[in-house]
Image (cartoon, grey):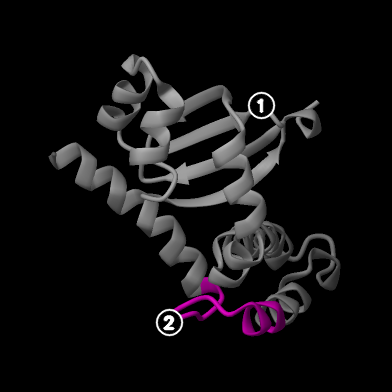
């Protein structure tokens, strides 16, 4: 239980760090996120600094963090989830599970239609129950799909 709580804290820490970078205190709103993103990209763009300037390397790191944070926060924003709910519902109700991977508290499920979703906060115990279940799709419908924060990761064909 203690290890689960520590991993959950790490997962939440990532979200909170991104929220801090974008000065988000409550729910993620795409319009304000986009405006802040544009401001931060201008502020931390590496081309803004001369070669040899110690801030150039910091700008490169900060710039990557801004881009990564923006894409991550957009993908878990309530507006994004609502906009894609129909597609997600169709996938989880009509497709089987083609593959899945688990690392830390991240469960990645690839569906038979080629779509791939990441579920955050899934502990090793739940993952083991999924693996050992005779009916993995049924288990996932009951205990994963609507129980964890998720985002669409990519199409399986986009990996290559």
- The mark that comes first in sequence, 1 or 2, is 2
* Mark 1 residue crowding within 10 angstroms, few (<14) / some (14–19) / many (20+): some
Q: Position of residue 92 (x, y in %)?
A: 55, 40
Asked where in the image residue 72 lies, by quadrant, the reply is: bottom right
Q: Position of residue 155 (x, y in %)?
A: 73, 36
Q: Position of residue 27 (x, y in %)?
A: 46, 78
* Mark 2 residue crowding within 10 angstroms, few (<14) / some (14–19) / many (20+): few
The N terminus - image quarter: top left
The C terminus - image quarter: top right
Tell me if 125 is positioned left or right of 44 in this view: left
Please provide the residue range marked out in magenta: 21-35
Magenta span includes 49: no
Tell me if 160 is positioned left or right of 4 in this view: right
Query: Which one is nearer the viewer's eye here, 35 or 152?
Result: 152
- Indicate whether 56 appears above or below 156: below
Please name the residue shown 75% across and 78% down the image: 38
Note whether residue 2 is visible: yes
Q: Which residue is mark 1?
A: 112
Magenta span includes 30: yes
Q: Which residue is mark 2?
A: 25
Marks 1, 2: nearer the viewer: 1
Note whether residue 103 is visible: no
- Indicate whether 61 appears above or below 109: below
- Indicate whether 88 appears above or below 18: above
Per the image, label 2 sits on a secondary structure element best described as loop
* Marks 1 and 2, how far apart at CA: 38 Å
Tell me if 11 is positioned left or right of 81 in this view: left
Please name the residue shown 70% across and 63% down the image: 63
């Amino acid at each position: 239980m203690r290890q689960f709580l520590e991993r959950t804290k790490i997962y939440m820490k990532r979200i909170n760090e991104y929220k801090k970078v974008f000065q988000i205190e409550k729910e993620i709103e795409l319009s304000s996120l986009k405006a802040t993103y544009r401001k931060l990209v201008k502020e931390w763009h590496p081309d803004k600094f001369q070669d040899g300037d110690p801030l150039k390397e910091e700008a490169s790191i900060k710039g990557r963090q801004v881009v990564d944070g923006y894409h991550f926060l957009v993908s878990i924003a309530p507006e994004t989830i609502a906009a894609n709910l129909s597609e997600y519902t169709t996938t989880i109700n009509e497709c089987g599970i083609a593959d899945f991977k688990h690392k830390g508290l991240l469960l990645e499920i690839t569906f038979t239609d080629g779509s791939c979703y990441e579920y955050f906060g899934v502990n090793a115990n739940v993952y083991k129950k999924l693996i050992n279940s005779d009916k993995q799709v049924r288990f996932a419908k009951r205990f994963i799909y609507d129980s964890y924060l998720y985002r669409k990761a990519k199409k399986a064909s986009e990996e290559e």
